Amino acid sequence: LSEPPTGSKVLENKIEQFMHKALILARRAEGAVLPNPMVGALLVKNGMLIGEGWHACYGGIHAEEAALNNCKERGLDPAGSDLFVTLEPCSFQSKTKHNPPCTGIIVKARISRVFIARLDPNPRVRGEGVKVLKAAGIEVRWGILEKDASELNRIYEANMLRQRPYVHLKAALTLDGFLAGSDGSSRWISCGESRSRVMKLRQEYDALLVGRGTLMADRPRLTVRDQSLPDQDNIKQPLRVILSSKGDLPEDWPIFEKSEADVKVSGDVLVCHSRNRGDLNRIVLPGETPVEWAGITNGEDGLSLPEILGKLYSRGIHSLLVEGGGRVFQSFLKTDLWDRLTVFQSPDFIGRGIPFCGDLGISSLSDKRVLHNQITALSGRDIEIQGDREEYPCLQD
Ligand code: AOF
Ligand code: ZN
């Protein structure tokens, strides 16, 4: 990579190619590192790859160190090489580890240039890593394939920047934008294929959330049931979060049935209710798991979402899939407390019913909300539309 000189098209393409490879390495740790980020790193000298590494498990060594170890294992000298890393190298001394911060390791290895995809949203680093490297005379460039790197760690980014779980809203709508008929019936708006897509989606999240209305109308079990998975009993079940101001649950909610199958495949249940409801009756799930109750302050539009998200986050919930209904979607959308939206739109229409999200305080089309990074795909006879609240989070606020 020492030739041709900086600025030439060939070099620029190569930089992106190496960064792309580093991003692929990072993804090898999918599902294994949260709440830490996925990170990949490559060392390149004279255009040749001399080391590669990634952050492989939670608490394990960082990607930069792994790449340097790999280089040394090959009997090669990293001095004078270029480092491609998908996240800004850390500049703080970890409380849990004895090794120095990655910036120190990079300087010591006499690396010449550092190419970074994304600055670290962790407030302990954010720009500090770049500063330390520059102060040591290392050439640093960042922002290469930045959007891809942000997408890779979207959960980590929401956690670090907003101190809350990553929030994904998921809705099944009729062609005319209704969540349910006016009698509350919503089974089934989306087709079988879309429903199995939802099962896959549920597996990616630490918790699922629905409002009381949806629970009463549909009695969803809120579990992951995926017949295509070999080991049904060992699927990690998400926490089931119910928003119910009064704190009532349907007595005939199928999860209360004491069947062996349900005991095996159920996550815990947390009911968020209005704080002034006092202590609520203890309900026990099959397997003697108690339902947990959380008293929440009433906000303008019902239970305070920042408080709920704060509670979930402090309980170790890093990502949340919100499955309705209309009032719940309205609250998340109005308060901007969401990151991604997925809609499964069926080709059927009903003319009147329960709308997707009700009033958002928008009267003119010029104030419409738009989805960024939009992806549209066919899902059986439905259309799946996915998009984000923002292109990717801004790190300077
Ligand atoms: C990683 N892997 O490859 C890099 C990280 O818990 P610690 O001590 O490992 O620190 C985690 C922080 O280190 C993380 O939030 C991020 O700021 C920084 N960089 N972390 O887990 C890596 N490069
Ligand atoms: Zn590090």
Image (cartoon, rainbow, N blue to C red):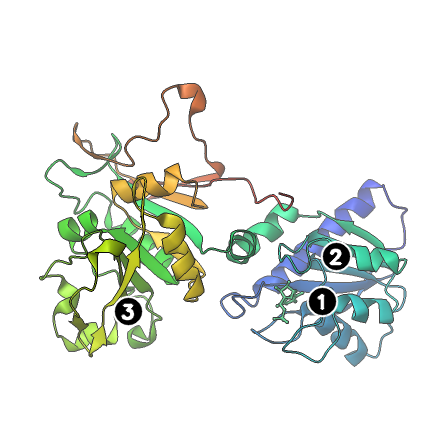
Which disc, if any, is residue 120?
Answer: none
Callout 2: few (<14), some (14-19), or many (20+) C-alpha neighbours within 10 Å? some
- SS of the residue under disc 3: loop
Query: Which image quarter: residue 181?
Result: top left
70 vs 171: above or below:
below
CA separation in Å, label 1 and label 2:
9 Å
| Pointer 3 residue | 268
Name the foreground residue: 334 vs 229. Answer: 334
Which disc, if any, is residue 128?
Answer: 2
Q: Are marks 1 and 3 in contact (CB under 8 Å)?
A: no
CA separation in Å, label 1 and label 3:
36 Å
Mark 3 belongs to which amino acid? Asp
Q: Assess mark 1: CB under 8 A from ligand 1?
A: yes
Q: Earlier in the sequence, mark 1 or mark 3?
A: 1
Query: Which image quarter: residue 232?
Result: bottom left
**Which residue is drawn at the image coordinates 32% and 68% (left, top)?**
237
Mark 1 belongs to which amino acid? Phe
Q: Earlier in the sequence, mark 2 or mark 3?
A: 2
Q: Are marks 1 and 2 in contact (CB under 8 Å)?
A: yes
| Pointer 1 residue | 92
